[in-house]
C-alpha cells in the first residue's frame, strides 16, 4: 500500500489502515474473484486455501468470429492477416510493456516490442483455435488483473505507474514461488503463459533466432559437415565426465 | 481418357500406387491412376527455407494443420473436410489421411528399414499373429531394386535386425550430431547399439533429383527431390513413359463386378462436380491406404459378394495394426550451453537404436514377444512456438535460462511392433456417410498386454540410457497403459487386407492378388501380415514393385 494519499475520508478511507482484503472489497474486486477456486491444486501437489486475499477477473469474452486458414493454405506466401485482430489499443499497450519486461533490449539485441512481438501475441490470441482462445482468456485476464493490482497498490493503472512500480508487481508473479501463494497463483500462471509466448515470438524473429544461436536453415553444398571441432571437444569432455566412450557402427 | 486405352486402374498415388504405376508403365502397360485429392507439385508448393516466424502462429499446429503450418499435408491430417470416420464407444483411434497427389509420401518421415527374416515369420517363432506367405530371401532383391530407385542413405551394419543391402545400393549417411553421439555412447554402456538411420533422402544426386542440401524439414515437402516423395520421382517418371494418366479429385466409391462376380470397373465421385463415373479396366489395383482400400472393398457389396468384395474370409478390415509409440525425454545437464553449430542435417535422425533383443527373445529372457526401435529427438532446432527450459522470472536471467537449455533436451521415441488382436479392426458405419455419399469407416481399438509390456520395457530402457547421459528423473515413470500412443497415432496402420497362404484366413495371396477375384489386387499396407517395428513405407513400395512385376508377367502371358 502506498501512503501518499491525500484523499479525504469521505471519498476513500485512509488506505494504510486497510487490510488487503478490505481494499479488495472497496475496489469491488473481491466480488469478481470467482475464478479462484476454494482450493487451488498445484502441480507440486501443494494446495492453497482461499482466504479472500486474491482477486482475479472473470471475463466473458465475445467469441472470435474469424475462420482459420483452412486445410490447404498457401505455404509459399503465408496469409499475412489470416483472421481479424482482437486486442484493443490499450491491451496492446500493456502487452508491449510486458513484452519488454520479459525481453528487454540487451546491448545490440533488440527488445521484444522493437521486433513486433506484441503483433504476434495479438495474432495468437485472436486466432480461432481452441488453444489460442484458452490463451486469450489467460492473457486478457492478466491485463485486467495488472490494472486492478496497480490501482490497489498505487492508485493508478498499470500503464500509468512507473517502471519500478510495475516491476514490484511483476516480481510477485514472475517466479515459481508465486504459484504457491493464494494472491498470485492465478496471475502467475497467466504470466507464465504470456512469458512463453513472448519468448517464442522473440526467438522466431531474425534477431531472436540469431540471439539463441540457431545456425541452420542455410543450404550446404556437399556433405553435411557435422559437429565443429569445438562441439566435439565439448562432447569428449562430457563423455569423460560421464565415463562413456564413443563407437558407432 | 476416351482415347487412352489403359489396361490397369490404380487407386491411389502414394507409396504403393505410384510404385505399381511406375513398374507397370515401365513394362509397357498403360495405367490410369485415380487420386482422391487434388493435384500437387512439390517443386512449386514446398515452403523451402521458410522460417516459423513467417507463418501464422509461428508455424504451430492446430486442427487445420495438425503437424504445423508448413507440413506438406493437403486437405488432410487427423480430419479431412467432408470425410468423417467414427469410432466404437470406448475406442480412441486417429486416422491420418492426405488428399493430394502423392498422398502421405509428401510428408512421411522417410525412415526406411528393411524387414528382416524375423519379421516375416513371427508366428513360426512365438505362435502369435500370422506368418507372411514370403520370407526375407524372397524379397531381398526387391528391396535392392526399390532402394536403388528411391535412394536410401545409410550403412550396412551387419546387425540381425537390419539386413544388409547389396553392394553399391546405399548412399553415404550424414555425420552424426553431438546429442546422437552421446546417446550412442550411453547406449553402448548398456550393451545396446546405435547406428546410422536408413532414410529415403539422397545424399548423392539421382535421376532428376538433387542431393540434400541439409536445410528445410522434409515434412514440408522437398522441391529439389532429395527427400523421396512419389510426386518428384515415381509419378513423373511413369508419366514420362507416356503410359500413365492421372485423374485427381476422384474419390473411389466402389469396385464393380459383373453377374458372375468378376471385377469389371471402379466407380468414383468427381469431387468437383459430385458426379459419379464408372471406368472399366482389365485389372484393378487398390492402393488407397490400408483403411481406405478396406473401406472400398467393404462398400463393394453385390449378390456374389454380400459381405463386401474379396471378403469371403471375413478378414477385410480385421487385423488392423499400428506401431506402438511412447516418448521419454529429459534435459541433459552436460548439454546445456554447449557450442553451437548447424544441426539441421537431413532434418531427422542421423543415428537411431535398432532392435537389439532378438537373441534375448529367443532365449525367453523378455516378457514380450516383439521388438521396437528408438528414434532420437534432439538438436538445435529452428525456433518455433515453444521455448525449452525451466523458465522463471523475466529479462536477461530468463533469456539466459532459455539459451542455456537450447539444444540440451534429448527424447527417445519408441516405435514397436503390435500384434493383431480381435478387438482392433475397422468396419463400415452404416449410419454415417461422407459428403460423397460413401458410408464411412468405423474403428475399434485395444492394445494387448504384449504391447503394454513392450512399452514398459522401452520406458525403463529409455530412462536408463538418459540417466547414463546424466539426466536426473525425479518423477516415477508413467504406466504403460497411460503412456502408450493412441491407435493410429503413429500413422503406420496396416493389416486390414492381409496376405497369406490360404483363402480361409487371408484376403490376398503373396502377390497382393485377392483370393476371390483374380483381377483385383491390393498394393498398400493393408496386405501386411504383421506390423514389424520398422516404418512401413519402404516395404509397401518393395511389395508393390515385386507384385506389379508379377502382375505384368501375368498380363504378358494372357493369364489375366
Image: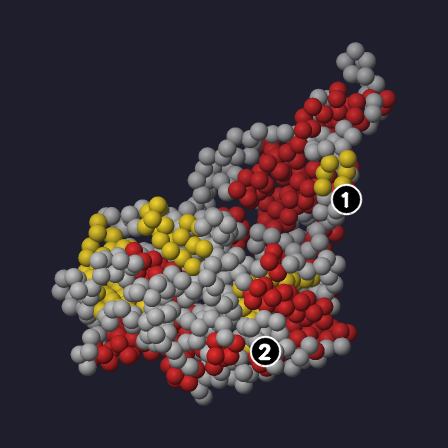
Q: Position of residue A110 (x, y in %)?
A: 64, 49
The chain that hosts pointer 2 is B
Residue at 44 percent across and 50 percent down: it is B87
Rendered position, B106 above or below B126: above
Tag 1 near tag 2, CB within 8 Å: no
- The circle on residue B361 is 2
Q: Relative to A84, is B183 on the left or the right?
A: right
Give the CA separation, mark 1 to mark 2: 44 Å
At mark 2, the secondary structure is helix
Label 1 CA crowd tier, 10 Å (few <14, some 14–19, many 20+): few
Q: Position of residue A72 (x, y in %)?
A: 39, 51
Determine which quarter of the picture holds residue B505. bottom left
Q: Residue furthest bottom?
A: B167
Residue identifier under label 1: A46
Q: Residue furthest left?
A: B3
Identify the coloring: secondary structure
At mark 1, the secondary structure is loop
Amino acid at each position: 500500500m502506498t501512503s501518499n494519499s491525500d484523499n479525504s475520508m469521505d471519498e476513500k478511507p485512509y488506505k494504510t489502515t486497510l487490510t488487503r482484503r478490505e481494499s479488495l472489497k472497496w475496489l469491488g474486486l473481491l466480488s469478481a474473484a470467482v475464478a479462484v477456486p476454494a482450493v487451488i491444486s498445484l502441480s507440486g501437489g501443494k494446495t492453497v486455501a482461499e482466504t479472500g486475499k486474491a482477486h482475479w477477473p472473470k471475463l466473458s469474452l465475445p467469441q472470435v468470429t474469424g475462420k482459420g486458414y483452412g486445410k490447404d493454405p498457401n505455404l509459399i506466401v503465408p496469409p499475412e492477416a489470416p483472421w481479424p485482430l482482437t486486442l484493443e489499443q490499450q491491451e496492446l499497450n500493456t502487452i508491449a510493456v510486458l513484452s519488454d519486461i520479459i525481453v528487454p533490449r540487451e546491448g545490440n539485441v533488440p527488445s521484444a516490442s522493437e521486433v513486433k512481438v506484441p503483433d504476434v501475441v495479438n495474432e495468437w490470441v485472436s486466432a480461432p483455435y481452441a488453444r489460442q482462445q484458452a490463451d486469450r482468456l489467460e492473457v486478457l485476464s492478466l491485463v485486467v488483473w495488472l490494472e486492478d493490482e496497480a490501482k490497489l497498490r498505487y492508485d493508478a493503472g498499470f500503464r500509468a505507474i512507473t517502471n519500478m512500480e510495475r516491476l514490484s508487481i511483476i516480481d510477485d508473479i514472475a517466479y515459481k514461488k508465486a504459484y504457491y501463494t493464494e494472491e498470485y497463483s492465478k496471475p502467475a500462471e497467466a504470466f507464465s503463459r504470456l512469458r512463453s509466448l513472448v519468448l517464442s515470438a522473440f526467438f522466431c524473429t531474425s534477431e531472436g533466432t540469431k540471439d539463441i544461436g540457431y545456425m541452420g536453415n542455410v543450404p550446404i553444398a556437399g556433405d553435411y559437415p557435422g559437429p565443429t571441432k569445438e562441439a566435439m571437444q565439448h562432447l569428449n569432455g562430457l563423455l569423460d565426465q560421464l565415463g562413456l566412450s564413443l563407437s558407432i557402427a | 481418357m476416351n482415347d487412352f486405352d489403359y489396361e490397369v486402374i490404380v487407386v491411389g498415388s502414394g507409396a504403393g500406387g505410384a510404385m505399381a504405376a511406375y513398374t507397370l508403365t515401365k513394362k509397357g502397360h498403360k495405367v490410369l491412376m485415380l487420386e482422391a485429392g487434388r493435384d500437387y507439385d512439390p517443386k512449386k508448393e514446398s515452403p523451402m527455407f521458410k522460417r516459423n516466424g513467417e507463418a501464422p502462429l509461428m508455424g504451430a499446429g492446430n486442427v487445420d494443420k495438425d503437424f504445423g503450418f508448413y507440413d506438406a499435408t493437403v486437405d488432410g491430417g487427423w480430419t479431412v473436410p467432408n470425410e468423417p470416420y467414427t469410432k466404437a464407444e470406448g475406442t480412441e483411434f486417429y486416422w491420418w489421411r492426405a488428399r493430394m497427389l502423392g498422398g502421405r509420401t509428401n510428408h512421411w518421415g522417410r525412415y526406411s528399414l528393411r524387414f528382416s527374416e524375423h519379421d516375416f515369420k513371427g508366428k513360426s517363432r512365438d505362435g502369435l499373429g500370422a506368418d507372411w506367405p514370403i520370407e526375407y530371401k524372397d524379397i531381398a532383391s526387391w528391396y535392392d531394386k526399390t532402394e536403388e530407385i528411391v535412394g536410401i542413405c545409410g550403412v550396412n551394419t551387419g546387425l540381425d535386425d537390419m539386413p544388409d543391402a547389396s553392394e553399391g545400393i546405399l548412399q553415404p549417411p550424414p555425420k552424426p550430431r553431438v546429442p546422437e553421439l552421446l546417446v550412442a555412447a550411453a547406449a553402448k554402456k548398456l550393451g545396446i547399439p546405435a547406428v546410422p538411420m536408413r532414410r529415403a533422402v539422397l545424399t548423392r544426386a539421382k535421376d532428376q533429383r538433387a542431393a540434400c542440401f541439409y536445410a528445410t524439414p522434409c515434412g514440408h515437402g522437398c522441391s529439389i527431390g532429395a527427400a523421396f516423395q512419389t510426386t518428384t520421382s515415381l509419378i513423373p517418371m511413369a508419366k514420362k513413359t507416356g503410359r500413365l494418366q492421372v485423374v485427381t479429385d476422384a474419390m473411389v466409391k466402389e469396385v464393380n463386378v459383373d453377374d458372375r462376380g468378376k471385377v469389371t470397373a471402379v466407380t468414383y465421385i468427381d469431387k468437383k462436380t459430385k458426379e459419379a463415373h464408372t471406368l472399366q479396366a482389365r485389372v484393378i489395383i487398390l492402393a488407397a491406404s490400408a483403411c481406405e482400400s478396406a473401406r472400398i472393398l467393404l462398400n463393394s457389396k453385390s449378390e456374389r459378394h454380400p459381405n463386401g468384395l474379396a471378403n469371403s474370409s471375413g478378414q477385410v478390415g480385421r487385423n488392423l495394426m499400428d506401431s506402438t509409440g511412447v516418448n521419454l525425454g529429459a534435459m541433459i545437464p552436460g548439454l546445456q550451453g554447449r557450442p553451437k553449430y548447424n544441426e539441421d542435417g537431413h532434418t531427422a535422425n542421423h543415428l537411431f537404436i535398432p532392435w537389439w533383443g532378438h537373441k534375448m527373445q529367443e532365449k525367453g529372457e523378455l516378457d514380450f514377444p516383439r521388438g521396437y526401435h528408438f528414434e532420437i529427438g534432439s538438436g538445435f532446432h529452428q525456433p518455433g512456438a515453444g521455448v525449452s527450459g525451466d523458465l522463471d522470472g523475466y529479462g536477461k536471467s530468463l533469456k539466459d535460462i532459455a539459451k542455456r537449455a537450447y539444444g540440451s533436451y534429448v527424447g527417445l521415441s519408441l516405435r514397436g511392433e503390435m500384434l493383431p488382436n480381435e478387438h482392433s479392426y475397422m468396419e463400415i458405419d452404416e449410419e454415417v456417410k461422407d459428403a460423397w455419399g460413401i458410408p464411412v469407416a468405423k474403428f475399434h481399438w485395444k492394445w494387448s498386454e504384449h504391447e503394454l509390456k513392450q512399452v514398459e520395457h522401452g520406458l525403463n530402457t529409455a530412462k536408463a540410457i538418459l540417466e547414463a547421459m546424466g539426466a536426473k528423473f525425479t518423477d516415477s515413470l508413467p504406466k504403460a497403459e497411460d503412456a502408450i500412443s493412441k491407435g493410429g497415432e503413429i500413422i503406420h496402420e496396416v493389416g486390414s487386407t492381409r496376405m497369406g497362404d490360404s483363402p480361409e484366413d487371408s484376403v490376398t495371396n503373396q502377390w497382393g492378388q485377392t483370393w476371390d477375384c483374380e483381377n483385383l489386387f491390393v498394393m498398400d499396407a493393408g496386405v501386411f501380415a504383421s506390423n514389424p517395428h520398422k516404418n512401413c513405407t519402404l516395404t509397401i513400395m518393395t511389395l508393390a514393385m515385386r507384385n506389379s512385376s508379377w502382375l505384368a508377367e501375368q498380363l504378358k502371358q494372357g493369364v489375366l
